[in-house]
Image (spheres, rainbow, N blue to C red):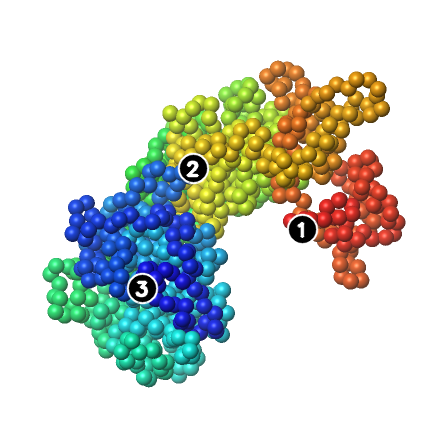
Amino acid sequence: MCPPSSPLGMGISDTLPSTWAGSQGTLGEGSAGTSCLEGAGPPEPAPALSETKGAISSPLSGYREQHTQHKGFASLVWAAMPGMLFRKNRDSSLHPLNLSWVFGYNSSLAVHSLMDGEDRVLLYVSSHIVVIHDILGNKQYHLQGHTNVISCLCVSEDKRWVATADRGPDALIIVNLLFGNPLCPVNHSGLIPASAETESSAQLGANVILTFEFQDYVIFNPQNPQEFVSNSKTQVIFYLWVSRDTGSHVSGARKETFKCLVGQFSQSVFHFNNAQALTGTSAGKLVVWDMDNPRTLPEELPAKPHGITATKVVSMQKESLTVLKVLESCVVTGDVKGQVKFYDGQLRLLTIYSHDKVGPIRSISFSTILPSWSDSSNSVSLTLNRNFILSTSDATMFHVATDSTNFERIMKEVKKAVNAIACHPQEPLVAAGSHCGLLKVWDYKETQYLVSRIFTEAGIQCLSYDPEGYLLAAGFTDGSVYILDAISLQSICEKFQFSQGPVTHISFSYDSKYLATADENHSVTVYKRVLQNGSRCWEHLAGLDSHYKPIRSILFGVHSDSNEPRLLSLGEDRQLVEYDLNSSIKDHLVVTHRDRLEQAAVPLCLAWYPQLSTESFFLTANSCYKMKLYNVTTKMCRKTVLGPIYGSPLEKIQILPRTSSADPQQHYLVYITKDKVGLQILPVDGNPHKSSAFICHPDGASDFATSHDGRYIFTAGGKERTFMKWKVNLPALDAAAFLGGEDLIPFYNLLNGGREGEFFRELEDYFYYVQLCSQGIDTMEKRQVSTHIPLEEIPSVMRAIGFYPSEEEIEEMINEVKFSKYADTGEQVIKINLGDFIKLYINHRPALGLSMKTIQRAFQVLGYDNEKGDKVIDTGDFLSLLQCRGELFLGIEAQAPATAMYLKELSASEFLPLTDIFSQNAIGKSNFP
């Protein structure tokens, strides 16, 4: 329950909606202000209402003067001035990445007009962000706090409050729009209407057990906040919010109860006469509901239930009604033809607003400012003179001026997935492509839309600028490739159609002589720039089915012994394929090397590593949260480190371009996971404090790009139909890494129990025991105290502390240490100290440990069903697999003595026990995540 001084403190704990079956979502005590919404914290003192200097003009000024007191108490919230959000100073941020701009919006949700007249401020939802957009001032303010895509929102009639909800936990957040501060986060999900008095809200969703089907629209009675109505496509339900002692009452009907065809229900409203309700349908009809006993009692008396009856069905038009609103003394409808119609209380047509460019209407939001010439003596005239904002299902917004019936398009965004994004290599330009075929280019410095082109044949899947900045290449879902002028977006040659599936990757060589693509059919295709008739043009060179699983990356580079382009492709088949472009001829793409990079993990992304030493590397990230450095010539794995762990592995990586003022020794890596964007300080060493990540697209980040100066990162949201601009703040990341500790401190904290724990003491004992063994247990000579152990003892100590690496992993660990200084000194390292061993252990052990799920999966694949239906493995088959398949496990007694002794107790005809017993006795672990 909110504090008494809160505008929501109305004693909700004593009442509940009658359909909640005894369950109630109460507002948590002390929860106000605890959300991570941007701008959270105690409200700043509001300026006096008479102070208008520097304030944004308000459509609520007249209303505010009458309502500075709410229910008998004063509140800073109710004395706030609209426009304060845009005057907040947000330059000083403590985060490495800060959301700067959101492009696109969720066109399935309503768009609300917060201000009008001289100012035009809209509120809409983009992914998990609520955007307050000053159209004329070209500013955005972002309300953050949701970790899932927002599924519904509502704004109070006075436009002071917004409530948003998603489908995850802690889903509902109520925010003061004048300050941007959260009021009360509530743990529910579903639909969230606000009453006219902004005192109560209703929630209907998957988390509340109802006796009805899922409801997709709900609204309060503006004249009686204790009544509300909801509807699905086939059902309308009326509710009365009563005290617990009074009982409950529900009225409703399904479309099957009508004698005529009414279609599917869209939206419902209460009539302004307070005696009727209306429901729009897909058949162009309005269902009129009469209240049998409309409540006319004084407000102080308790509410009483009354019956609701559908009295008639009025045929309004042939087209489907998508929006239904009541405003002042008018009923307003919107339909699939883009028409807005005004009716009086008797449903007689007053006027129509339409335009052939307007698609199916999704929402209508009216201004609160009336033109100065309006006739204030006539309520119908007042309504007809209100300007309004239209949003359509095809992601377009219009401002409609009622005096001139002028439809001004103020925003047109993509209506399908945004999977492609690219930044210009020299100018502040960003291009984004959608599956609807819309390609748009923005000036991201000024946040100005520049040019666009619509491709009707197929959707855009990937984009790439050439290094010179003259060309923009686009790969499409039908396998076609377009090469466009980077400024005009006009094609410079005929489209290419050599891929049999959607083009997933596209990239230019550093000298702009080659263009390579990868597609969903695991093929790599190369195009070459040639001189023809004295002018440059492009032609198809060759293609090859290089992989047998999806291709994750294609990467151009430069040969170390020449300036010729070098092309690599990396697939989920764990193969790194290198191509010889010089030797390739028409229809024959030459492969120079095929190298398997991983044994069990799947490599997911690839990038060239900065030249931080005399040795050159490329960097990969795999499905096991590991990042690996490979020598660019030998393809030998030279280093394995623990990568960022933020819920899912790294999907794409790229080195952040350096700014002109940056330290030449400082380099950073940009990455995206399934739903996050992050930064990593280089060189990589496994220190978790050197990375950070932020939720960018909860439903999946599809791509990202970095600005040419490294100041901004752009992320594409795929099916969310948005892309976002993030401002980079590197000093914040450096500060976080410094506060995390230096040298071994971050790695001690990754050990079970830390530096003072039992595990560390056990590791020390093993370390010194190996020293004794290396000098001879029975020797009588004076022992040499050392801080190192021989490299060949690394596997023994690893197994002793519970990590059982494969032979390939052992080889990689030993080579990592052995050749760590070879490029600089020409000498091999033959021993390792305790600190380096701890780093080696942290970086090579399974990032998430060995889980019971992994063992159960092995039993599912290798096992049989016993008489009880449990999966078991035949002992003989198990030993045969160990010794004959994969890495030969011949020396089981030496490699894993505990397992060997346990297996010897079982005859070859017996079955291994169930997974939990096997894990405890054979592997030596009982507690699995």
Residue 655 is situated, as x and y percent measured from the top left of the image, at 48, 31
Q: Residue at x 38, y 43 (%)?
A: 99
Three-letter amino acid code of the residue under disc 1: Lys
Q: Residue at x 72, y 29 (%)?
A: 767
Do the residues under discs 2 and 3 have CB atoms within 8 angstroms? Answer: no
Residue 96, label in figure: 2
296 to the left or right of 473: left
Do the residues under discs 3 and 1 have CB atoms within 8 angstroms? Answer: no
Residue 906 is situated, as x and y percent measured from the top left of the image, at 86, 49
The secondary element bearing badge 3 is classed as: loop
Q: Is residue 746 visible?
A: yes
581 up-or-down from 115: above or below = above
Q: Is residue 315 visible?
A: no
Residue 277 is situated, as x and y percent measured from the top left of the image, at 32, 76
168 up-or-down from 203: above or below = above
Q: Residue at x 82, y 17 (%)?
A: 781
Q: Which residue is mark 1?
A: 853
